[in-house]
Image (tube, rainbow, N blue to C red):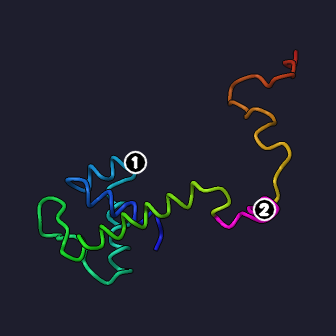
Amino acid sequence: MDITLLGHFVAAAEAPDFARAAQALGVSRDTLSASVKQVEAELGYALFDRSAESTMLTEIGIAFLADARLELAHAAGRGSQPGAAGNSGGGSGGGKAKANKGRGRAPAVKGQPKLGKKRQSR
């Protein structure tokens, strides 16, 4: 299961409602709701009681919340260790590295004169 989906589920379960959880995550309420529905579809169980006014977990949701928290903690631990993401071999692991990454020309701004160029006279 995707770690992002688990993070969305945990945030929704811990917040008083989906709107506040979405605001805390910096996503829309629809995105958060879709993520939770995708987790429910993958598990095959309803994790939230949709008839309640506020965010209410079902019994299965409460049990899954503990597992999701453990999985997120485990994933965070893997991400902080050097070479943990299967990148312990030689090379960059993500493709060819550019020698001038982060350097180069500044982006052109519309309406501003180009640097190093003189205006054409009439």
Instruction: Find residue 24 and report its horizontal and vertical position in percent.
Output: 34, 47
Q: Is residue 94 magenta?
A: yes
- Determine whether 45 is above or below 61 in the image: below
Instruction: Find residue 36 and report its horizontal and vertical position in percent.
Output: 33, 68
- Determine whether 17 is above or below 41 in the image: above
In the picture, which quadrant includes the C terminus?
top right
Q: Residue furthest left?
A: 52
Q: Which residues are magenta?
A: 85-95
Residue that numbered label 1 is attached to: 26
Give me the residue at 68% from left, 26% from top.
111
Instruction: Find residue 40 and report its horizontal and vertical position in percent.
Output: 32, 76
Label 2 or label 1, whichever lies nearer to me, is 2
Instruction: Find residue 97 and report its horizontal and vertical position in percent.
Output: 81, 53
The tag earlier along the polypeptide, 2 or 1, is 1
Q: Could you tell me what secondary structure mostly forms the magenta stretch?
A: loop
Which quadrant would residue 54 be assigned to in this image? bottom left
Residue that numbered label 2 is attached to: 95
10 Å neighbourhood of mark 1: few (<14), some, or many (≥20)?
few
Give amino acid for label 1: Gly
10 Å neighbourhood of mark 2: few (<14), some, or many (≥20)?
few
For label 2, the SS is loop
- Determine whether 114 is above or below 61 in the image: above
Which quadrant would residue 18 be assigned to in this image? bottom left
Give me the residue at 33% from left, 72% from top.
37
Given residues 43 and 81, the one toward you in this image is 81
Given residues 60 and 114, the one toward you in this image is 60
